[in-house]
Every structure is written in structure tokens, then in C-alpha cells.
Amino acid sequence: MDFQSLLSQFLNGGGATQVGTFRSLELFRPELILSGSIVLMLLARLTSFDKLVPTHWIALLGGMAAFVNVLFQFYELRMDGSGAAELFTGLAIHDSFSVFIRGLLLFFLVFVIALTVLTGIPDDEDAPDFYALLSGAVVGMMLMSSANHLLMMFVGIEMASVPSYALTGFLKGRRQSSEAALKFVVYGAGAAGVMLFGISLLAGLTGTAEFPELGNRLHALFLNGFGTQQPEGRVVLLALLMITVGFAFKLSAVPFHFWCPDAFQGASAEVAGFLSIGSKAAAFALLVRFSLSVTGGSEGGLPDLALVFGLGLGVLAAVTATFGNLAAYSQTNLKRLLAYSTIAHAGYMLMAVSAMLVLRSAGASIDAGSSVRAIEGLVYYLAVYLFMNLGAFSIVAFLRNQLFSEEIEDYKGIVHQSPLLAVCMAICMFSLVGIPPLGGFFGKFFIFAAVFDATAVHWFMWIVLGAGGLNTVLSLFYYVGVLKVMCMQNRPADARPVVLTAQSSSGLYVLMVSAMVVLLGTVWIEPLSLVARHAAEAFL
């Protein structure tokens, strides 16, 4: 191919789904808007413009503008029925699934920025750096959700991880915050190195780094079926194991969860909430896309590999959920308890990915819509998890500002001074357990229904389903334990007063987030389910 042909392909696209550079830039506009807001924030600091216009306004307007762009893109995909488009010669992909996750991340970013403005973290001096890091991490997460190439996958993960390290240690002068950031960096660097080695093994074996081609190349290698008797089979399993290490680190799945409790306890509640939700949404979107690419392909895919990979993720999911719930029992710090809760919920969501792969391994013998329903359940759960977890962390942040403590013991009798906070915390906690009619119940119901469908393919999914049900019951006790302290114990006479009502901006914020949890479990079940299904159908 001569230079003229290469230039033409770069500008105009090639193949049935690739679009040209200018169209790619148009579809990449939300990331460009967010990147532009980062540049504006840094320039505002250099020129002292942030003294006139607070930096959080630039960050907030940038996030909202990018979110509106994503809404238009999602509407366009639904109206014209166009399929996936590969951007920048196949490095990224634009489909309903990636657009939904990008929109979810931007919507979450707006809520986090609003929370930081209300709580006063960061201060005016550090605001440009803080919001630049926050927006930069979201750009990396958006790249993860639309990655269509092994190189873009790794770049997206690192772009999301590096700002997160800095945000964890952003509370200057606090030894605990600096120690948490250092642990996060060390574990992150190790996981990234292992993952990169796995990527090099997979790319070297298949001769490609493009997601759409991975399944086809692996199918060509294992024409007689996938097996570990062949050297190539052992290399593939080793590569997938190493790549899964990187995903498990981002998801804080056992045994790569060590950074999570310390990082959450050392970081501010606002940053802990951001890490608990944003990184999970992006990592699950990437894990779904990567696992389907490796086990699928236009040539029929590798059902044996899909089954092995799915069952392996099922084991990881059951262990992660069990460990997270059991470790949460002994915690006295609410942020640390929520960190182990985050680990447990990563296990629940991994069950959906496991069920999807196991169902796809059965091929035509199982209803083709079953695997789509698994992705639909995951997407629904992520949307609900955004609000119920953000609500819990925002309440911790508001109480910290008034009590100067995040210990559960200091929350005694909060209901007597601020009934709003106690009621909203109860809504978030009961939703995290999965009690109807809250959004968390339907999120778990959809995931467990997908796991139940997968039991028809392999008996081990009964164990995964049993682990999910048992852990739901176990989690009830420590969540209720927090509510017992807040609502059923008397407030000590010498305790600091808590003043937060629905008339205040902070009270309105907590009320709005908690109301979303209720609405997503009642009147908005069907609309969100339809949107989630449309996003999941991108993989059909």
C-alpha cells in the first residue's frame, strides 16, 4: 500500500465500519470538550483567572456540555438505527454500549463536582489541580469504555489510574492520605506491568491487537477446539490470566483488593466515592468488550474458551463477594466499611459477566437473548449503583464536615438531630442490600436471573448463584448495624450537633440522590431497562 492509499484510509476510513478522521473527531467530541475544559482550568491557574471565575464552574460546564453531546449521540443511534462505527482506524468504537457508559460517567462527574462544591473539598488554591485530575481520570475512563484495540485498552486504564493516584493523596499534610496513595501507586504499577505482559503475549500469539480480529485469529489457531494440550492454549490462558489481573485491580476484586480499604480511608469521602463508582463502570465496560472479542469473532468463536473464562470469572465473583461482605463486619470506620462493600458489589457485577460468557459458550442451544439480558442487568446495576453508593459517600462527607469524624461510633443518634440524613442513609443502605422496592433490588434481580439462566449450561453456576444469594443475606447485618447506631441509639450529650435540613443545598443534594434510588426501583424501572437493553444489543 502506497502513501497515498494510507493517507486516504486515514482521512476517509476503510472497511465497512471504519469512519474517517473528521467523522471520528466529531464522534469523539465529548472527550475533546472535557480535555478542553482541563486546558482551560490549567490556563486559568496560570493567568490567575481562577480568582475571577471559580475553577469548579469551568469543570462543571465542561462536564455538562460533554454530557449533552453524549445524549445527542445516543438519541442519534436510537433514531437512525446505525450500527457500530470504528474511530481512528479502529482504535476506538462508537456504539450504543460505549455511548451509554460514557454518558453515565459524565453524569456521575457532574454529580461529584457538585458534591465537592458543597463540601468545600478542595479549597480555592488547589481547585484547578483537583478538577483537572478529576476530569482527566474521566477522560481515561471514557477511553476504556470505547476501546477497540489492546493498545487503547492499556492507555485508557493508565489514563484513568494515574490521576486517581494523585487524587487519593490530595489531602496534603495527612500521613494516612499519603500512605494510601503510595500503596495505590505500588499495587497499580505491579498490576499494570503484569497486564502489559499478558497483552504482549496475546498480541504476539495472534499477530493482531485489534479486538474484532482477536477472536478470528484465535479461532484459526484452534480449529479443532480449544485445549491446554496445545502450547498455544496454555499461552492464551496465561495471557488471559495476566490481563485479568489488571481488570481485577481496577475492580478491586479479590485478591487484588489490598489497595481499596486503605485508599478509601486515606482519601476524602468525595474521592473515595468517585473511585468506587467511576473506575468500576469503565472497567466493566472494557471487560465485557474484551471478553466478547477474545471468545467471539465472525468465524463462530471459541465456546470452550468462553466457558473456561466465564467459569473462572464466576469463581472470582463468588470469592470477591464473600470476602468483601465478611471483612466489612469488623470495620469501625464507615469509609472503610463502604470500601469492603464496594469489593462485594464488584463480585455481584462480575457474576453478570460470568453468566454472559457461560451462556454464549452454549451457542444456539440457548436463547440468544439470554446473554444480552446479562449485559442488560450489568448496565442497569451500574446505573443504580451510581446513586446508592454516591448517596452513602456524600452523607459521610457532610457528616465529616460537622462531626470531624468518620467513625461509626460518632454517628450515634443522628436521627434525632438530622432525620433527613438518617432516612437517606437508610434508603442507600437498604438499596445496597437489595431490598425492594429500591433500585438495588432490581439490579441484583436482573443479574441473578442471568446467572440462573447460565445454570442450564453448567452446574457450577448454581454455586455462583448460591453465593450471590447468601452474600445478600450476609450484607444485611452490617448495613443494618450502621443504621442501628444512627437511628436506635441516643445522641451523647457532649457530641457535636448535626444541622442539615432539606432546605439547605446539602440537604437537597442528598435528597435528590436518594430519590433517584427510589425512582429507579419504582416508576423508572421500565425506561432504564429499555435503555440498558438498547445498550446491550450493541453486541448482537
Image: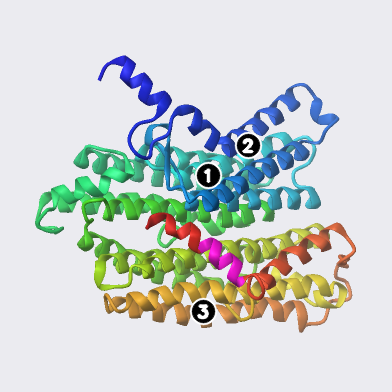
Circles 1 and 2: CB atoms closer than 8 Å: yes
Mark 3, residue position: 472
Mark 2, residue position: 34
Label 2 element class: helix
Dominant SS in magenta: helix
Residue that lies at the very extreme toward the front in this rendered image: 80
Q: Residues within 10 Å of mark 3 (few under 14, many from 20)?
A: many
Circles 2 and 3: CB atoms closer than 8 Å: no
Q: Residues within 10 Å of mark 2 (few under 14, many from 20)?
A: many
Front residue of 354 and 51: 354
- At label 1, which amino acid type do we have? Met
Residue that lies at the very extreme toward the top in this rendered image: 3
Label 3 element class: helix
Front residue of 532 and 413: 532
Q: Give the Cα separation between the discs numbered 1 and 2.
A: 10 Å
Q: Does the stretch in magenta take in 530?
A: yes
Q: Give the Cα separation between the discs numbered 2 and 3.
A: 38 Å
Q: Residue at x 89, y 76 (%)?
A: 493
Residue 117: x percent and y percent?
78, 48
The tag earlier along the polypeptide, 1 or 2, is: 2
Q: Tell me the magenta residue range.
A: 525-532
Front residue of 518 and 481: 518
Q: Residues within 10 Å of mark 1 (few under 14, many from 20)?
A: many
Mark 1, residue position: 142
Location of residue 55 with respect to 21 vertically, above or below? below
Left/right of residue 203 with respect to residue 320 in the rendered view: left
The tag earlier along the polypeptide, 1 or 3, is: 1
Residue 17: x percent and y percent?
38, 40
Count of numbered circles in the view = 3
- At label 3, which amino acid type do we have? Thr
- At label 2, which amino acid type do we have? Leu
Residue 169 visible: no
